[in-house]
Structures are given as structure tokens and as C-alpha cells.
Amino acid sequence: MDVMPAAPPARLALLYGTVREHSRRLAAPLSDADATVQSMPDASPAKWHLAHTTWFFETMVLRPNWPGYAVFDESFNFLFNSYYETLGARQPRPRRGMMTRPSLEQVMAYRAHVDRGMAEMLRGELPQPVRELVELGCHHEQQHQELLLTDILHLFAQSPLHPAYAAPAPAPAPALAEAAAAPREVQFRAFDGGIVEIGHAGDGFGFDCEGPRHRALTEPFRLADRLVTNGEWMQFVADGGYRDPLLWLSAGWAAVQAQGWDSPLYWQQRDGVWHGMTLHGLVPLRPEAPVTHVSYFEADAFASWAGKRLPSEAEWEHAASGLAPEASPALQPRPAPDAPGLRQMFGEVWQWTRSPFTPYPRFRPAAGAVGEYNGKFMCGQFVLRGSSCATPEGHTRPSYRNFFPPDARWQFSGLRLAEDA
Amino acid sequence: MDVMPAAPPARLALLYGTVREHSRRLAAPLSDADATVQSMPDASPAKWHLAHTTWFFETMVLRPNWPGYAVFDESFNFLFNSYYETLGARQPRPRRGMMTRPSLEQVMAYRAHVDRGMAEMLRGELPQPVRELVELGCHHEQQHQELLLTDILHLFAQSPLHPAYAAPAPAPAPALAEAAAAPREVQFRAFDGGIVEIGHAGDGFGFDCEGPRHRALTEPFRLADRLVTNGEWMQFVADGGYRDPLLWLSAGWAAVQAQGWDSPLYWQQRDGVWHGMTLHGLVPLRPEAPVTHVSYFEADAFASWAGKRLPSEAEWEHAASGLAPEASPALQPRPAPDAPGLRQMFGEVWQWTRSPFTPYPRFRPAAGAVGEYNGKFMCGQFVLRGSSCATPEGHTRPSYRNFFPPDARWQFSGLRLAEDA
Amino acid sequence: MDVMPAAPPARLALLYGTVREHSRRLAAPLSDADATVQSMPDASPAKWHLAHTTWFFETMVLRPNWPGYAVFDESFNFLFNSYYETLGARQPRPRRGMMTRPSLEQVMAYRAHVDRGMAEMLRGELPQPVRELVELGCHHEQQHQELLLTDILHLFAQSPLHPAYAAPAPAPAPALAEAAAAPREVQFRAFDGGIVEIGHAGDGFGFDCEGPRHRALTEPFRLADRLVTNGEWMQFVADGGYRDPLLWLSAGWAAVQAQGWDSPLYWQQRDGVWHGMTLHGLVPLRPEAPVTHVSYFEADAFASWAGKRLPSEAEWEHAASGLAPEASPALQPRPAPDAPGLRQMFGEVWQWTRSPFTPYPRFRPAAGAVGEYNGKFMCGQFVLRGSSCATPEGHTRPSYRNFFPPDARWQFSGLRLAEDA
Amino acid sequence: MDVMPAAPPARLALLYGTVREHSRRLAAPLSDADATVQSMPDASPAKWHLAHTTWFFETMVLRPNWPGYAVFDESFNFLFNSYYETLGARQPRPRRGMMTRPSLEQVMAYRAHVDRGMAEMLRGELPQPVRELVELGCHHEQQHQELLLTDILHLFAQSPLHPAYAAPAPAPAPALAEAAAAPREVQFRAFDGGIVEIGHAGDGFGFDCEGPRHRALTEPFRLADRLVTNGEWMQFVADGGYRDPLLWLSAGWAAVQAQGWDSPLYWQQRDGVWHGMTLHGLVPLRPEAPVTHVSYFEADAFASWAGKRLPSEAEWEHAASGLAPEASPALQPRPAPDAPGLRQMFGEVWQWTRSPFTPYPRFRPAAGAVGEYNGKFMCGQFVLRGSSCATPEGHTRPSYRNFFPPDARWQFSGLRLAEDA
């Protein structure tokens, strides 16, 4: 982790407290059983997210740096290590759901125990590398906050009961609803080509893979000023988009056939009406809202169908530079506001880019365990940019590089079109 | 279900109450999470067992026969149907663990609701077929009580923490322990051949597949008077039993290689001492106790190694006729008592026979949903006889035919040797 | 191999010569490529059959018993051992098709080399055990002759060109054809129950698993006097037989769904007419001919649909005792002759019985390599009785026990119905 | 296919004849069986390569453009279409080895038939687009010539006999051998960063994915002047390279474990000496020769172990610009000559780059069937540069982009190290 200048002491304790409190709030609607079950190998139980993020602070920060700290339970190192080969053996990822013990309540006690240790520690002066690790741990926990939500959604989507994680948002007022149903025309904004600078600039936090900041060469391009909508995706479906191999990458077409895709994950028709499973349960889809839960393969096929392409990450970041990221108050992506400008860059859905996740020039993983954070995943994944309705506040910036394999669909992942100018 | 003369009214209410209360007691040590997770496709969550047995009474007994009964929750028919094609679509078996809702508490409320309906119904006169269904439902629930225990053991065995379902039994007094460590010599008891009668005789309850009672031809044979022990199995392991293909059926050897078997399920060595995962957690194995958690393939290979064979089910039942089944007070199989006689026929471990599970002469499945109870499984399974330490009281009889595929190991399954006379 | 009194010297040389010549004739229509490719793990290349049967004589007979014999190629022991753990490592079964070398021509040279050795050896006096091994080797080769044909049919069925192994048989004369199209009504012949004797009697050759001859108990039953026909199977298909789970064993229904069965293997509709892939290529099905290429699961489901059942092997053998087996001159099963009597017991299709393949009372595998012949397969298979159009002359007898897993379809396997009397 | 200015008429006929003749020569050592078997889903039978390349000319060139041409066999369109969805249904790729018919001889007759048609056609004037298609067909066949060799090597490596495709090359003279055994020290040559031009320039043939020529930004870097050798790889193995997860990409480590990699494909130890399966059979490895048959994952792990990295494709192409590609006369990669300069860029092994295979700026697939040539594979693959000892003469150029998935090992794939300057 090539961490950037760390936060000053008081801000660090504040950051820590805020992040940890947010996790607690996210866990509140969940029962012990909800928090324990693993719905697929790629997803983790909520309880595991809550414990693993805590283990991160215990193992990376407290154990090596805070002599008075008493380890909560030695067995937890095996249980809650994610993928750090440096830190010993661990419960295999696909079997995280076998751990009915410790209970959610015990995990919460674990969190409180570590929080007490951290609070003591953060009261004093800390060396810069430790402050950096604490800050990293906070951003690490924020990543898991988003995963907790997408993993719970995946779990609840497996249930015949379609439970809601949260009460449905109040319906929009009729007038607004009508207006929204006809989303404003998409506009393509032109950008000149040339050498641009991208990557994390050094002030504030950034993950190692966001740097080093470097020059990139772009050709002139145009970028859609809003996201692709559910309504547009319905047209793609109706036009046979999922049945025409010529629109798809070869591996994408294989996925369509092997997994029987005929619409985004969580879509289903009920009495002729498209519904989607959401954190509010199974609800009718709003045509004007951004499409979500599509894979890279689907995003790429849609772009081909539309005669466009996906942006590269350099193009996206260049276009986003100067925009102020905002977090969403909702748990579902919202329609674009009817106002000009490059909209929905942050806070609705992650946006697939055409860029494979590769190291930036002169990127080097850090030494030690945190060096395993990102670098070893730089193969077989595509970069998504922006942030989603599930991304916690303070975890969004233009240089952020999210990444998933091209067939992943359970994140809040959508798309924005681009084209050569 | 070719059910035998059903119990008289008062006894039926008593039976119902006793069985239902026993399930509640079995569930008591489990958390919501313990009761929800499915550890493999062949196992079911405890919550599912508790709800499915209740659904059986609701669907087979109350709905069609008790007009005033109000269905607890219509969605439960989809959730808790097991395999009755006649009764509609259902949650796929391998995905029973996805149902974090309803909670264990709600399932207990469901049980109470159905119990109230049943109590009312059982107060009055009931037609014979309905009484038979109630009795069937009770024996059905007893089957699931044993599965609940073996499934929980399997789940807890997946946990790095090796949790105990129940407090460990008190250790035997030193003198007893010593005596037990040297189990008495096995004796083979001789039986004449000839035509014998086997199958359920008609008084008391029996499952459809236990009948009709019929003649069977046996050749003279000899049967071991006790079960094979852990100590004997350790010799088999030490002698390379798991590495010599000539001892194994071809499909058994394939299972050894594909699944990496080198000892019974749940055995592991710790510091050179064999331990076994039990309902009391991970404990050192007692050499004089019966071996358990072995597959048919292993039992057959052991018998080859020992120069013996497994008994047929006709031989076993003939030898057991006249014995009074007893239930075990323990949750683990116990060493044979040091006394002559055919011992351990019931209450310790199910005993693999060499008999594939096939229909008896003139067997016909019943009409309707209960006709799916056993007949459709008469392929690819072997019969086990006796009963185990997990079998509830009142659920044991000499004609009982338990059956599992030849590679199943998670039941309390062991063996008793036989040979031609 | 508990081989029965072996053939006298002159007859043995004659048997050997006849069997070996028949293999050569079977190979004649095949190219090097035809003889090399393996179409599925359960099938073997024709070249492998030709070489493996030769290896059997070389390894079991010549090497240990004929000092002057020079081994043809030491590497062939690895290449052409089938499953004899006693005889060393071998090419894994699913990868037999990787051996493009030796060529078919070289395999034929191998055959000639071994034939020369055998001819010399058979000229003299031989000890009884050696004579028995030679006889076993001949019957072993006859088994592979049938497999060679069914494996080639499976291979050719994978080809988009549907090649014919042999020229089509001449069409039946119009008058005959018409008569045949309406097969005579099936009759059920009654048999008394009681103790019958079955198993190989001791004169002439029999495989180890056919003995010992022993008593079996049967209940009164009735047996169809002809096989089930294509026309009857078409009715089963048309009546939704492949879509009704209640007709199927549980494992059978799983196979229907997993493998997408909707008709027998090799059936396909072309312009509304049912065709079948045969050794004469893809041809229209004759409704009056016996159905073939059905699994045990399908045979059992058909019997349920028809309100009947499959016979046990004791019933079948009892009914067949006294019948003189005849080999078929055709490569396809033929319609039943329009004449009374128990017809089509031999020479058309193997007939599934309801009997799992288990050891007869007092069966013991022989010592040494031949002890691996049959005993280790006594699990997970069902017995078929009779013989088929692909069975070579001289390889048929009432006590013959063929066996395959319940989902196997590529043999000439059909059925004959039975019922309780 | 965005084909570049096509060759003039006479040169085109010459090119066509030369390419076709080379295929014939490559097929000469193969039997019908050798040419038919498919050793894995990723490989194709030699016969299929010979027929498919012919089908390409028949379908893309003759049928639409040469009215007098008589199609050889209509069924071949199904048999020999590779992946062109535009051109109809086809034999599924993993089942290409099921086609024992047509025979190799018939495929050669097919080739002759199409060659006659092409010869007639090429005698006259042809419109530019047709000339371009002919040229594309020639380069397409050259690609399959290399695959024919690598697929045959893979097939022969499955055989316990390790057959040789070609007679072993004469051993090097002793003096030379000694010299070679100590390969000269590797040198890293420095290159300035900046904007460079890469991509096919427009004169001579290039595949669509090699263009458009465009600007790319590079940082200063250094490139090894020779390939990594077998001897260096042996050190990597001896140092535990295959057992240290920290050296590997996460997906690479998963491949190591799932596939049991512990050395390059085709390496095996015999009596303590590393051997490799080659087109000359199984031979001892020469330490000074380039390592080959390593995956991207292995190449990347090796580079990590060596403290270096793989070059990007822009770096590689920039360094190679101006070099004259040479084809190799050998069937195995040869040691680097003991002379200064950037050596072994072409003709020994393909060199993995760190660049995922993505479209160049402004790349657009061509309309029609040839548009499926490359574009749809731009996902999940990495670019290899240079050429190999199996690449036919005239098929090499600095802009050539070969690509394979990161776990592919059966190509002649090796590596050259790079580092940041």
C-alpha cells in the first residue's frame, strides 16, 4: 500500500469512529442467520465482513503496535483472514458460510473489544506508518460495507420470499414520477485528445493501485452525459440482444449460453411487467432509472448494439476530473436529473470501462502483507469507475479503480456510453 | 404407505405430543444461524427439518381433513416440501440453506400453530386413514430427528472451531475405562439356512417398504456377536487398507481416490492420536467403541480385509427376530458389554448390509403423495439395519430398512461381520 | 474365474481360431482413424479392443506358460491393460483414445504375432488351468467383440455424417413388411412360484459370476412372450412418459433432467418421422422392431407406465431354462416372428431385469488377476439377460449375467415386461 | 478484416501455392489416426486444420466469386466452419475429434479440388477485395500451420510412447555444445520513453487487430537482449518458484494448485535429469536453450522472482522496429548466438507481454464474416510478440499480435524480461 500523506490524529479518530459506526448501522436489519449464510463463493457472509474488517485492525495495527492489547480470540486469525498468504492459513473462501459460530452477537463483542483498543491507541501520538495503516483499515472497511450490501442483496435474491433489507423508499410524487418516466435525451460531450494526467495525486487517501499519477495518451472522444437506463435495456432485450452472438465477445457469448442470461441479474417478469430484486425487495423496474447488475460482457454487447463503445478508464477519469463526488442517500440508483451537464458520474452505479485492470507505469506493490492488497488481482478483471448507491460516504474519488471479472453481475454495475470523436 | 393398523385415539395424541416435544428438545442447543446453514446438498438445515415435519402434518393431515384449520403461511408449501412431485414446486434441495427467513423463532411459532390444530383434531374421533396419516407423520418426524442430529454434526465438523452440540458425557470411571479398552473377543454365532419369514408383520407401525412380509431363502451363515470397533479399524488403516485397490469394489476405489479417503469421516490425527468429531466436539477415539461414519464401500473393503463379508438383510433380520430394540441414552456409540449374546444390534450404529435396497415381492407404492415415500429411491442404495445412538426412542424394530448410497458417510453407520457357514 | 471343465485340446484350438478370425472380420470396415478415436470415457477405441484381447492372451497365457514366447512390445502392457490392478499401471481409461500409435496395422501385426505363439502352444498338451485360461480368453474376446460394435456405433453417432458401419440389410419384401408393421399381440405366460435352481450348471463355459448354481425362491409371475417394440415406445413418448416424474425412480428423473432425455439414445425426428442411428447409418425406425438403446431408468419408467414391472433375473433365467440360444445374423434387432411361444429371449436386445448385480450365495472371486474380472463391479449395476444382435455366436446361454449402470444406453439394451401372478 | 494493400496477381498465385504446399509437407509425417484425434478442447485435429483452411478459401473466396466452382461436399460447411456465427451452425469445437470421416486422404482430395478452383481463378484479373481475401486466407492458413504443429505436439505428449513427429535434429558438434551450455550473460538494453508509433503501417499484409497504426506513450525502459533459458528456469524451480504464492498473480496461484503445475508443460524428470517432450520426442533439456511452453502466469511469476517484469507490447514493438524477422529452420527453440545485440526477437518462442489483448484506438472490426476474425476475442487474453520455431516463413513481422489466455501452455511460448529504466 503506497499510502498517501495520512490524516492528522484527531481526524483519524473521527474517521475511525464514523466508519465503524456505519458498519454497525448496516448490520442492524440482519438476523444472526442472515449474517451467517454465504450465497455463492464470490460473496461473503455479513458476519464475516464485520469480523474480517475488525481482524484487519487487530492484526495489522494493534498486535504489532500496541503492546497492551489482548487478542480477543486466537482462533479468529484462521477464521477471518481473507487472502493474505503472508498471514497464515485461513478458512477457504467458499466455506466462509460454514461458520455458524461465533454468532453475530459475539462478532459484535469482538468489534467492541477492538474498538476499545483502537480508541486507546488513537488517543496518543502515533508514528506515520501506523497512522497510514489505520487510515487504510478505514478505507478497507468501507469497501466491505459496499460488499456487505451487495452480498446481502444476492442472498435475499436466492430466497423465495424476496425479503427486503430496508423499508421501501417513499414513492415519488405523481408529477415527478411522470416527468421521470421520460428521461431526458442523452447528450455526448466532446473531449480533446492528447496527453492527460491520471492517477491519485497524493493529497488525501488513495489505494496503491490508483498510483502513481502518470501521463496517459488519449484520442479525441465523446462521453454520454448520463447512464444507460432500464428502459433502454428493455429495448435491447426486446430487440433480441441476448440472442445475437454477433453483438458479443466470444467469452461473453459463452457466458450467455452457459448461464442462461436473458436479462440483467435480478430481473424477472411478473404478469408481463419487468421487476427487479432490490434492497427493498422485489419491485417493478423504473424505466428511467439506470440499469444495474449487468456484467462487462453485457455492457460491451449493449454498446455494440447501440453503435457505441465503453470509455477507457483514462477517458473516464479525465472527464471526471474536477467533479465533486457525492454519496447517494438511496439504496437504489436514481434517474438522472433533468439538467444539463455530465451527470451520474458518482453515487448511482459503477461504470464498466473497456480497460483491463493493469498496473500503472512504475507501479510496485508495497512490501509486507498489504502488498497483497491489489497487485495480485491484476489479471482477468476490468476496471469500473465512479461509485454506486451502496458506496459509503467519503469513499469516492475520480481516481478510484474498482475491478471485477467480466462476468460478475452482483455489484451495482452499469454503464455509460462513449464513442470516438 | 401401506400403513399397518393405526394406534387408538388416546395413544395417538400421546405419540404425537411425545414426538413433537422431542424435536423441540433437539433444537434447544441451536442458534438461529446453526439451524439455518446447509453444509452439503445431502444435508438439510435443522430449521428445515423442524418446518418440513410440521408441513407434513399441515399438508397431509390438517388441510384435507380439518375444515377449520387456518394455514399458517401459504408460502411455506414451496419452502418446506421435500420431494413430493405430487404436491407442487419446491425450493431445490441443494438451496435449502439460502432461506435465512423464516427465522428459527418463526418456525417454532409455525410448529406451535400446527400443534394447536392437531391437538384439537386429535381430541375427536378420526377415520382410520387419517389416524394412519398422523401415525405416519410421527414416524416421519422421528426419521428427521435422526437426520437433524447427523446434519448438525456434519455442519459443526466443517467449522474450524469444532463446536460441541451437547456437553461431553461424563468420562467412564477409571476401572471401567480400563476394562472397556480391551473389548471382548468377537464370536460368530451360527444360523441354519432355509426359508425364513421377514418383513413387517402387521402389528404396530411399519413403513411401506418394510412389507409385505414374505418368505426368503437363506443359506447357513454365521454372524458376529458385536460390532467392528475403532481399534479394529485403526489396524485396517495401519495395514494399508485405504491404499490397496484389491480390497475395494471398483466404484469404492474410485471414491477413495476422488475424495481422498484415508480413514472414516471425522477422523483426524492430532499429535499422533486419532480423534473423531462427535456431537461432543473433537475428542480422542475410544478403541473399544464401534467404528462409525464409514461408507458401504469402506465396510465392504474392511470385510474383505478381514476375510469375511457383510450380512444380507434377510440374514440380519432373521438373526434379530425376537430381540427387543432399545434406544441409547448416549449421543455416541458405546462399547459392547462384556456379556455373551448377540449384542449391539440396536442403538449404537446402523449396520451396512450387502443388500441393495429393492422392493420386496409384491411391494406396490401407495396411491397419492405418500406413494413417493420410499419406492422411488429403490436404486443405487444399500440397506442398513438396526438403529443408532441418534435414533429416537420408539423408532426401532427388526424389520426397519434404512438405506443410503454406498458412499454416504455422515450417518452413524458402522458394520457387523458375517460369513458363510 | 471359477471356470468350468475346459474344452478338449482340438476344440480349444478351433475355438481360439474362430474367435480371433471373427474379430478380424469385425475390424475390416474400419479405417485407422475409426479404430483410434474414443467417443466417451465408457467406450473404447476398436483398436484398443483388438489389442487388449490380444494382450490378455499374451499376459495371462503365453508369458507365464510358454517359455519360448518373445513379447511383441514391452510397452503394450501399459497401453492395453484394462483394469487389472494386479498387473501394473496402465493408460487411464478415459484417455485410451490418445493413442494414435501403434496404428491399426501394427495392432494387426501384434495379433498375428500372438496368434502364432498361441498356435504353437495349442498344438501340444496343456495343463488344465492353462486350458481354462485360454477358454476364458476366448470368451473375454467375445465380450469385446460386442463392445467393439456398440462403441463404434456410439462413435459414428457423434459424426454429423452418420456413417454406416455396414451396408444396409436388404429391405423386407413388401408383403412381409406389411405383416411385420402390426406386431402380434403380446401374451403373458404364467409361471408357478417356488424354489428354482439358477446359475451356471458346470458343463461348458461360464463366467465366475454366473455361479455357483444355487436355489432361489420365486413367487408366481407372468412374463411377456415378446420384447417391447419401437411402436409401443413411441406411444410412451407421445403420452408424455419423459415428462412425468411420477413414473420414474428418483435417480432416473434426475438423469432425465440432467441429460435432457426425451427418447431413446440415437432416436431423432426428421420431418416428423422417428429415425434411429444404427450400424447401417441413420434410418427410419420400424415400429414393430424391439426398442433398443434404453437405460434401466427408462425401462423401469416404461414398465410403470404400462402397469407392469421388469422381471427379476431368477424369473428370467427360470423361464429361459431349456431354450436353445440362437445368434442373430443381423446387426439390428428384428421384429418378433408371428408364432406363439416365448420369443426373442436371445439374439435381439439385452433385457433389463430389476435385479442389481450382486454375488450369488457362496460366490468367491478367484485368486490372482482373473479374480478382478467381475466381483469388483458388484455395486451400482443392474443385470441384463439374454443376448443381442451384436453378441457373437457361441457367447449366449441362459445363465449369462450382463450388467451395466442404470443410466447406460449405448448397448443394445431393451426390455420385456413381467407382472405378479 | 481491415486488410492492407493486397499483393499483385502473380505474387498472389505464388503465395497461395507456397502456403498450400507447406501445409502438405507438414501433414506428411501423420497417419490418418494422428490427424484425426483431438487431445483437448483447445486443440484441433491436424485433419481439421487442413480442411478448415481449405473451407475458408471455398466459402469466402470461391463460392461467392467464382461462378463455375462446384462445391466439393455440402456437408463440409457444418464440419469445418470454426467459429463464424455468420456462416451457420457447425460441429462444436470440443467435438472436432469425433470426425473419423472424412479420412485424411479425402481431406487431401478436398484440398486438391479447391486448389484447382483457386488456380483457375488466380490466373485471371481479380477485384481488389477478392485479392485481399485470398491473401487473408493464406495468412490464415499459416496461422493454422503453427497450430497444427503445436496441437500435434500436445497429442503426442499424451501418448505413453512419446512419438516423434520428425527425426531428431543432428546433435551439435561437441565443441559447440560446450560453448552453448554456458549461455552468454544477459544484457538489458535501454530505451527512452516518449510517444512512439506502433501498429501495422499499411504496406504488406497485416491482420485487422494489428492496426490502426497509432501513437503510444512509453516510459523509459530496459529490455533483455535474449530470452530466458531452460537453465534459468531450472533455478526458478529449484528455488521453490512453484511453491511460493507471493510470486504469483492470484489467478495464477489458483491455476498452479488446480492443475498441479511444478514445471513447464512437457517437462518431466527421468533419473534426475530434466527432459522435455518435443517434436523430436522426449529428449533431455538443453539448459542454454530458451524455455518454452510456459503460461503467462508462469512468465509473470518468473519475472517477479527475478525482480523484473514483462515488457508491454508497445515497448516490445518499439524495440523490434527495424529488425528483420527470420524464420527458424529448426522445430525447437535454439540457444542465443554468442554475439551482442537484441537477439531471439523472432523465430524461437513467442514472448508473453504484460499487455491484455485490447483494441487499438479507433479499431473497428470489418463488416461481414471476417469481422469475427479477431475482435471478439479481445477479452481475457494476453498478447505475445515475436514468432516461434513453428511459425512458417513469411508470417512474421514486428506488429504481429498473437494472443492466448494466461493459462495456455501448449504454444511455443516463452519470455524476455524487462524493467523500468
Image (spheres, coloured by chain):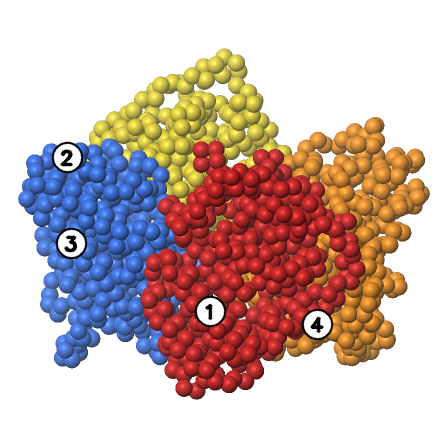
Chain colours: A blue, B red, C orange, D yellow
Q: Is residue C273 left or right of residue A93?
A: right
Q: Does D344 sit above or below residue A340? A: above
Front-lying residue, D45 or C238: C238
- Which element type, helix, strand or loop, lies under badge 2? helix
Q: Residue at x 18, y 75 (%)?
A: A171
Q: Which residue is mark 1?
A: B18
User: Mark 2, chain letter?
Assistant: A
Res. B253 in view: yes
Label annotation for residue A129: 2
Quadrant in the rendering for residue B26: bottom left
D63 with respect to B164 (left or right): right
For label 1, the SS is helix
Q: What amino acid type should be assigned to the residue bearing mark 3?
A: Glu
Could you tell me how far apart the alpha carbons at marks 1 and 2 are, in whole angstroms? 64 Å
The crowd level at tag 1 (other Cα within 10 Å; few <14, some 14-19, many 20+) is: few
Residue occupying the point 85% across, 39% down: C129
Figure quadrant of residue B323: bottom right
Q: Nearer the viewer, mark 1 or mark 2?
A: 1
Q: Is residue D335 above or below residue A97?
A: above
Which corner quadrant of the image does residue A80 belong to? top left
Tags 1 and 3 on a common chain? no
Q: Which residue is mark 4?
A: B362
Q: Amino acid at mark 1?
A: Thr
Q: Which mark is residue A21?
A: 3
Instruction: State the residue lying farthest toward the bottom.
Output: B67
Q: Is residue D88 visible?
A: no
Q: Residues within 10 Å of mark 3 (few under 14, many from 20)?
A: few
User: Distance from label 4 to label 3 (Cα)?
Assistant: 68 Å
